[in-house]
Image (cartoon, rainbow, N blue to C red):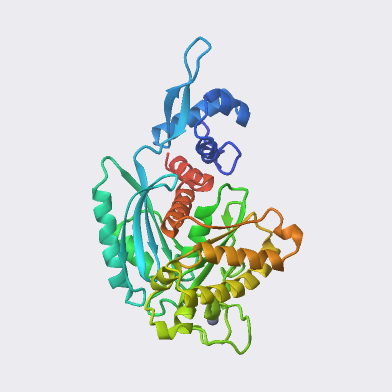
Amino acid sequence: MTVERVPASLGGATSHGHLLELIRAADGLSRQQLLSTTGMSRATLYERLDTLTRRGYIYEAEPLDSTGGRPSRKIRFEDRGRVVLAITLGQTHGTVSIADTTGRQLRSVTRGLDISEPAASVLDPLIQDGRALLAQGADETLLGIGVSLPAPVEAVTGFVKHPTTIPGWAPDSVVSAVKAAWDLPLVIENDARAAALGERNSDTETVVYVKVGTGIGCGIVVEGSILRGAHGSAGDIGHIRMTPDGPLCRCGRRGCLAAYSSGRAIQDQLGHLAFSTTGQVSDAAMAGNAEVLNALDSAADVLGQALAATVTTLNPDRLVLGGQLGSLATFVERVAHRVLADVVDRIAEGMVVEAGHPEDLAACHGLTTLVMREIFAPRAVDRMFSDVTALA
Ligand SMILES: [Zn+2]
């Protein structure tokens, strides 16, 4: 008997991985639908479906309407009881969520924290929360973990890099802490990027997501993928210099966008009101404090001005604003007004400017997407099958 040197499953349009992708994307398909979609021979298709079933990737679900003969069943992605753990870290609070494979939050815990503390004292309580949440689930299988951080993250390694928010954290602090708790696929992502991915309505959308909380973050999603840029800094708008002699920024330069429009900047501007958190600024705005509302208007104007360039470059379907200040209705309205006034009609036309979902939900959704792609992307699945072939 001859054995193929290079398994046919490597990269072909109808490899195990691509078949699984089709089944996942379509929310289940019949064998007949798979035959006509892929154009595969019946024997090869059935053999691959059998292998995928044996290895727990798919299962035969409800019977389809039968026109006589043996009723055929819908083939579904095996997602029953499978969950992802998402840890979404902000500067002052963190949420740990258990999500289903679509990124829907099933249960969660939120706790206050101070991101300027050492990594272990921030991460250990969240890992304990994760363990407790997992213990509450019956017949669940944890597939992987996603963590989002208010800092730049290197996509391949998950290392935090040059963070102004957490300068004391070692690059590998998050990877090491989480891997020590769970030896499973792990994805670490910047918080605004995770939320941007979670906010997309479809994989054909282009979305610009801007988080205005204590700091300013931005994530850009083009056709379902996070735009990273040559060195991973695409969308890092917080430190665009708006004026050369403006207020001092935490990065050490003057006049950055973050020095005008972030929650921290507003706290500094309103020093006499002694806000100690961005949440307090947000509460005062919602209570109608005129001074705070004025400061927010100015912050929104500067942000809108910066975003005019961003949206003109990217021509997005939607500009989504999140974060404790960014999602305030009055802030969204003001940013929208400014952006739409500053760009040409063909960019403004059809572009929706709106508040996002609560950040922890958006980031949880985005992180789950990343974890699922890491595990179930066609290439990852085909690699598993080629390993098995090599061992056989
Ligand atoms: Zn700066």
User: Is 77 rendered above or below residue 331?
Assistant: above
Question: In the rendered image, is residue 355 in sight?
Answer: yes
Asked whether 172 or 228 is in front, the reply is 228
Image region (quadrant) for ligand 1 = bottom right
Q: Quadrant of residue 276?
A: bottom left
Q: Is residue 200 left or right of residue 144?
A: right
* Residue 1, image x, y percentages: 50, 30
Q: Is residue 208 left or right of residue 120?
A: right
* Residue 312, image x, y percentages: 70, 64
- For the view shown, which residue lies furthest in the top direction? 68
Asked whether 196 or 289 is in front, the reply is 289
* Residue 287, image x, y percentages: 42, 68
- Residue found 62% across the figure and 68% down from its top: 230
User: Is 96 rendered above or below residue 324?
Assistant: above
- Residue found 67% across the figure and 61% down from its top: 314
- Residue found 69% across the figure and 59% down from its top: 315
Asked whether 41 or 221 is in front, the reply is 221
Question: In the rendered image, is residue 156 in sight?
Answer: no
- For the view shown, which residue lies furthest in the bottom direction? 245
* Residue 332, image x, y percentages: 56, 63
Asked whether 207 or 56 is in front, the reply is 207
Count of all numbered marks drawn on residues in the image: 0
User: Which quadrant holds the C terminus?
Assistant: top left
Q: Is residue 287 left or right of residue 43?
A: left
